[in-house]
Image (cartoon, grey):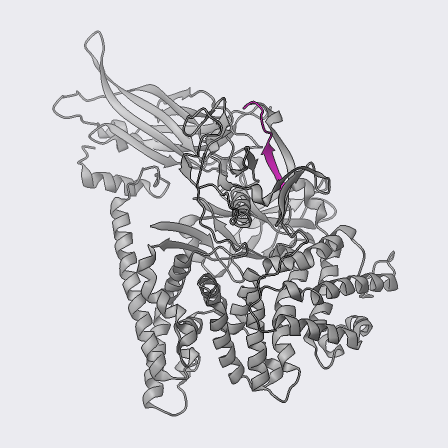
Amino acid sequence: DKIKDKILRNQRVKDKMPFSKNIPPYPGPNKMRDCYCTVNLDQEEVFRTKIVEKSLCPFYGEDFYCEIPRSFRHLSFYVFDREVFRRGSSIGKVAVKKEDLQKYHGKDTWFQLQPVSADSEVQGKVHLELRLSEVITDSGVINHKLATRVLECQGLPIVNGQCDPYAAVSLLGPSRSEAKKTKVKRKTNNPQFDEVFYFEVTRPLSYTKRQFDVEEEDVDKLALRVDLWNASNLKFGDEFLGGVRVPLRVLGQAGVHDAWYFLQPRENGGKSVKVEELGSLRLNIVYTEDHVFPSEHYTPLRDLLLHSANVEPVSASTANILGEVCREKQEAAIPLVRLFLHYGKIVPFISAIAHAEVNRTQDPNTIFRGNSLTSKCIDETMKLAGMHYLQVTLKPIIDEICAEHKSCEIDPVKLKESENLETNRENLRHYVDRIFNVITTSGVRCPTVMCDIFFSLRESAATRFQVDQDVRYTAVSSFIFLRFFAPAILSPNLFHLRPHHPLNPQHLLHSDPATSRTLTLISKTIQTLGSLAKSKSANFKESYMAAFYDYFNEQKYADAVKNFLDLISTSGKWDQKSIETPIMLKEGFMIKRAQGRNRFGLKNFKKRWFRLTNHEFTYHRTKGEGALCSIPIENILAVERLEEESFKMKNMFQVIQPERALYIQANNCVEARDWIDILTKVSQCNRKRLSTYHPSAYLNGHWLCCKLSADAAPGCTPCTGGLPANIQLDVDGDRETERIYSLFSTYMTKLIKMQEACGSKSVYDGPEQEEYSSFVIDDPQETYKTLKQIVSAVQTLEQQHTKYKRDKFKKTKIGSQEHPIGDKSFQCYIRQQSESSTYSI
């Protein structure tokens, strides 16, 4: 089975971080703070919000989506204050254990901020082996010794860019304080110790060979303590990485214990801080863990879904019923769109549900204005299929606006003393004109799938409202302007037009509220220009916006919008346009390994600015400088992860070329995955792509993975290829069907109620009962037939999941590498051991 994790939420996916409150004031004359929030997988930062200046109750209002590429123990959120020297100091944190995430699924929840201390910031696990053995002395006296073997650790935290760990082992008891240390392992957070330490264990009772008896009173007073430390060169001493306490009663009758343990925080190691003094953070977390079966298990449900466009009426289709029973339409839209896009059926499906919605609409001015399944599905399709259309259309001018920092404030109340209102208006008008022109001349690059959907919308609207000549335009503009271009201008980071807020604390000063304000004013104006509304001034609450819009009250703007809308809603299946101008797909700082150097030494690795377009992959000394190296896309033979042991560095991957591989380290696991995905997609059609590769580096005259000495030796591991050539989308159809199954399973009570509603409408043709009024049922008999098929398919999958969970539970061994013993699982381990052996404790 394929096991996959993801954090999912409303628009694309998300943790939503809207609000902090009661943050403690800054200890100085200016009590306010400049706060920002980070999202961490364990201790690895994967996202950072904008800075909210001068507030003790900051509103962030940001969403974050992440496919989780690795296992984790905690999803953590840290609140920081940007101090005078532009460095961030932690105020507090919220840490949610993986097993507790379902408690808060989809709910707005206030969390008390907890203190951040080095002693509580732990992650990773340790492998221990304990053996109690007898030793006969020269005098014939039998002593008992505890042999403690510290084998290895995995996933230790990296402290200040380094991890040089060692273990300290102690036997704890009323009169014991023995401590022994392993050797320090340099530059690794997965150290292999394999060292054994011996401790004498007092045995008050006599020993008989007939029974290896562990005396209860003695053992209850003894425990083994293993602490992991980072050997630091700083004057503050070594840093605590985590520890475990193992009571010797786990030895049992056999006198042997071999298990993995999760590292735990140090007891009473944190500072004495009143929790209520740190404030609170409001979060909305949606976490899903999908257990995806082989494809044949999903055939009945998948066939029902893909047949939806052919069902008459479409309201009786499986996909439409999913939208009816889900609490929010977006829940249904995300997996439906991805599934239909994957199987090439998105256009007929959206055409069918859009046609039905148009026929139910009474006023052409309200067409597609609600949060219906149709609107949400088209939104999601545009985000998936149109992302690179946005890149080539808007990114250059958005980058220019962010770089120039020109003042564009036109609200007289917000105007600064040094600013001139007319100058600001001219700046804003210049930007609006520039963006309006690039949008209205970009029709030839609009993705085919979007054009086909817009054609269907236009035809349905024009047929339904034949008197209104503008409805064929407003039906399309309500999506392409209102839900696509305007939001992308307003929040370019959410559409990958700008990088998310930088993870490097030294770059925090780049947070620019003035630029955000400029983008907000541009977005408002573009949205109104594209709406073709009859009364322009009525679209603005603010008088200064209505006055500014007078600049654009010319027929040429309306004509340009109509010509653009005509072009992108024209019927035809033309091929995707070839774009001569390179499209910037992704860029950012990473660390690369220089080619042809020795294994050791800092000079091997250098920080460089990487840039990927649809033409080439380059790196530069810094952003804006000329390329130091350029790799044409056609020369990329494979893009794969690099095993951590190659250079003792995490988050590394390799870009394989005909002559050699380029080794790169990303900033975190999420960023590494993003780079691998986009590089793989953009090079997927290369004719000479490899089928095998070397997962480890070529060092010291041989490949570390297969030990072959020839640097041109064929790869020893199959490539992880097979992604679609379309660089806009990578979908696992089985996973999306599994997600839809999970939604149907969650809302099973609504499915049953909808069946009851169908029966009620079939036998009682009168006023609709209130409890059934939320369902759209055009044909009760056809809808009931579909519902019966859905329930049958869902119950079959439910049985498969029950069997899978039962089998998995039987195979689960607490204390194994996959299921280490934690603070809550120790008693489960004791019970599990007692089922297989008898204790004499």
Whether residue 24 is visible? no
Q: Residue 129: percent from the left, percent from the top?
A: 31, 28
Task: Give 79 or 526, whichever is nearer the viewer.
Answer: 526
Task: Give 757 or 838, whichever is nearer the viewer.
Answer: 757
The part of the chain drawn in magenta is: 589-599
Looking at the figure, which quarter contains the C terminus?
Answer: top left
- Residue at the spot x=74%, y=78% of the render? 536
Q: Which quarter of the picture shows residue 368?
A: bottom right
Q: Which quarter of the picture shows residue 734?
A: bottom left
- Residue at the spot x=63%, y=89% of the render? 467
Q: Residue 500: percent from the left, percent from the top?
A: 62, 50
Magenta includes 597? yes
Q: Is residue 614 above or below residue 661?
A: below
Q: Is residue 177 above or below residue 493?
A: above
Magenta includes 356? no
| Furthest residue toward front | 687
| Furthest residue toward left | 210
Residue 724 relative to residue 810: left or right: right
| Furthest residue toward bottom | 766
- Residue at the spot x=56%, y=53% of the render? 280
Q: Residue 35: percent from the left, percent from the top?
A: 65, 49
